[in-house]
Amino acid sequence: MTKKIKVLLLGASFSADLHMDGYSRTEKAKVVAICDKSTDRVKSLAKDYSITDYIAYTDIEEALEKTDCDLVDICLPNFLHCEAAVLALEKGKDIICEKPLATTVEDAQKIVDTAARKGRHIYYAEDWLFAPAIRRALSIVSEGAIGKLLYVRARECHSGSHSPFAQKIAYCGGGSMIHLGIHPISFMLSQKNNEWTELVAMTSGGEKNNLIYKEMEGEDWSACLIRFRDGTSALLEGNYITKGGMEDILDFYGTEGCLHVDLNFTGPISCFSMPGVNYVIEKAEMNTGWTRPAVDEKYHLGYVDEIEYFIDCCSEGKDARIGLRGSDGLEALKVIACIYQSAKEGKKISNPELQ
């Protein structure tokens, strides 16, 4: 039997739960240590997945120094990604890093440069690329069923994060575009070899200019029109003003047809409940009346296959495919920086690397 990949998990909150679900479904890896400043969160996460044979840490440097592991999985708040990634890479470990890779282009570049210098791999966790519905949609587009692809509309939206780390630009890197729009951005860049030519964007602007969340430093609504080298265009959106649960929606338009993907509301269950069901979908404000309760939400959003893929890459000592590398996380942040520049200056931005 192939040796199990030993994993050190940094963080024990929301994204750590998503990744832990993936580890719980594979025989190829073992979480040997979990690090979080809250020991209660560590214990709760381990209990949820029936993990007993692990070591708990509250300090990242201590965890990296003492843990015998092959892979470090970074599920920390955005502003801690760079420090944790660099420390892990300097220790000679491959890393998985949740989106976004960092809060700034400069920090993302530092992570990528460190990995290159140490000869290690960065596995950038873009779950959309593993969602079964998106994979099927891409196979339909690839077979030519809708003709030549002309235009894509993609968005991730919900009713807003209440995490303190989403309220401040220093902690998150921005607002809804970097926190939610990162998914459609990374998805489109992966399909177009990171070759975008121009974009124009608008955002709500943050604080008093926001549509709803006046105390949030970053924007609560954002959209970008972007064109790629092959002539395809896309409208990419991220917002915190959407009620009724998470929206992960993609629309593909071609010369011979169109195709629509809804990751969250296309489940086979419809339920009418007066007392309410325990769980509907992520960010649903209500659980009474007619609802569409999710069926294996983490699998259908791509997290399970994502973790399995990264474990295989680590085991084989190879880089991930396009869209899932550290360099791809860096390119996504470069686009987001251009989006914020375009929105602030009210002008079109051309890709300086494709001039």
Image: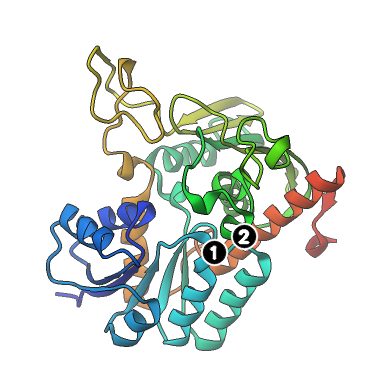
Q: Are marks 2 and 1 in contact (CB under 8 Å)?
A: yes
Front residue of 221/182: it is 221
Amino acid identity at mark 1? Phe
Secondary structure type for disc 2: helix
* Residue 291 appears left or right of 183: left
Give coordinates of residue 35: x percent, y percent. 32, 70
Question: What residue is shown at x 29% (from left), y 23% (from top)?
Answer: 268
Give coordinates of residue 158: x percent, y percent. 50, 34
Front residue of 212/179: it is 212
Secondary structure type for disc 1: helix
| Residue 96 in view here | yes
Q: Disc 2 to disc 1, how far (Cα)?
A: 7 Å
In the displayed structure, 104 sits above or below 314; it is: above
- Whichever of labels 2 and 1 marks the residue nearer the N terminus, that label is 1
Amino acid identity at mark 2? Ala
In the displayed structure, 142 sits above or below 174; it is: above
Question: What residue is shown at x 57% (from left), y 59% (from top)?
Answer: 171
* Residue 4 appears left or right of 348: left
Q: Quadrant of residue 43?
A: bottom left
Mark 1 is surrounded, within 10 Å at the Cα level, by few (under 14), some (14 to 19) or many (20 or more) other residues, namely: many
In the displayed structure, 188 sits above or below 147; it is: below
Give coordinates of residue 105: x percent, y percent. 67, 66
| Residue 229 in view here | no
Mark 2 is surrounded, within 10 Å at the Cα level, by few (under 14), some (14 to 19) or many (20 or more) other residues, namely: some
The label on residue 170 is 2
Location of the N terminus by quadrant is bottom left
Q: Quadrant of residue 125?
A: bottom left
- Which residue is identified by label 1? 79
Give coordinates of residue 99: x percent, y percent. 50, 57
